[in-house]
Image (cartoon, helix red, strand yellow):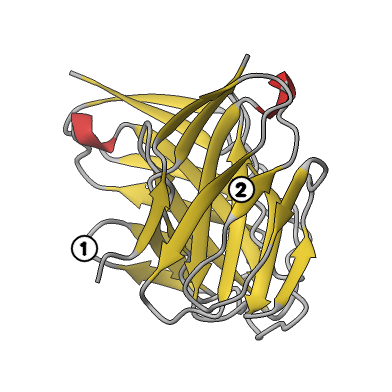
Amino acid sequence: NAGVTQTPKFQVLKTGQSMTLQCAQDMNHEYMSWYRQDPGMGLRLIHYSVGAGITDQGEVPNGYNVSRSTTEDFPLRLLSAAPSQTSVYFCASSYSTGFTDTQYFGPGTRLTVL
Amino acid sequence: LAKTTQPISMDSYEGQEVNITCSHNNIATNDYITWYQQFPSQGPRFIIQGYKTKVTNEVASLFIPADRKSSTLSLPRVSLSDTAVYYCLVGDMYFDQTGANNLFFGTGTRLTVIP
C-alpha cells in the first residue's frame, strides 16, 4: 500500500492563479479531509468527505473547492490564489469518521503564493 | 469536542523519560484520548489512544487517571529523533456520518531533544 499520496510536493503560484492539489489513498477509506498548517499554528480543517459524492466544509473553507467522485481521490482546488493561502496542505484519510479510527496523513504540499 | 490544553514546548536531554500532560476538563463519557506526533516537514502520525488507566505500545505509554480530566503521554528514553510536535486530541468514540468528529489538533507541544 502506498497509503496517502499528495502531489505536488512544492508549488509556487502568482496571485489570481488557480490550481488543484491532488490527494489519493489506496486503503479503501471512506473518510478523507484536507488541512492547512501555517507556521506556529496547528492544523485547521478546510473540507472533508464522508464518502464518494459527499463533501462538506470545515473550519476554513473560503477560497477552496473539493469534489469526491471516487473513493480513492479527493482533490483540493484553489480558485484564485491569494498570499493568505501560502501554507502547507495535508490530506488525510481514515476508515470512517469514528474518532477512534486512525487518521493517515499524506506528506504534504508546500504552497507559496506570491 | 472536548477542548484540550497542553504545554507549548518542552526540552529534554537524550536518554531521559519525557512526560507531556494534556488537560481536558470537560471530557465526555464516550470520549477517547488520542495522541499524534508530527515530525518537521511531515504529516501527523498516530502514536497511541486510550480511554482509561494505562495503555502501552512500542512507542509510548498513555496514563489516564480515574477522573479522565487529564492524560499524560510518556516517552521512555528519548532520542534526537523524537524531536517533534505532539498533539493531544479528545473525541467521541462513536461513528459519526456527519463528520462532527473531525479532529481538532490545536497547536500541540513542541518537544526538543537536546544531545
Identify the residue position indicated by label 2 in the image. A35
Q: Quadrant of the N terminus of chain B?
A: bottom right
Residue A95 locus on image (x, y percent): 49, 80
Q: Left or right: B104 with respect to B21?
A: right
Q: As displayed, is residue B94 above or below residue B60?
A: below
Q: Quadrant of the C terminus of chain B?
A: top left
Residue B4's disc is none
Q: As displayed, is residue B99 above or below residue A46?
A: below
Q: Nearer the viewer, residue B26 or A97?
A: A97
Identify the residue position indicated by label 1 in the image. B58
| Residue A73 in sight in this render | yes
Secondary structure type for disc 1:
loop
Q: Nearer the viewer, residue A59 or B91?
A: A59
Q: CA distance from mark 1 to mark 2?
A: 28 Å
Callout 2: 10 Å neighbours few (<14), some, many (20+)?
many
| Residue B64 in sight in this render | no
Q: As displayed, is residue A49 above or below residue B74?
A: below
Residue B92 locus on image (x, y percent): 68, 75
Q: In the image as oriented, which residue stretches furthest toward the front?
A: A17
Secondary structure type for disc 2:
strand
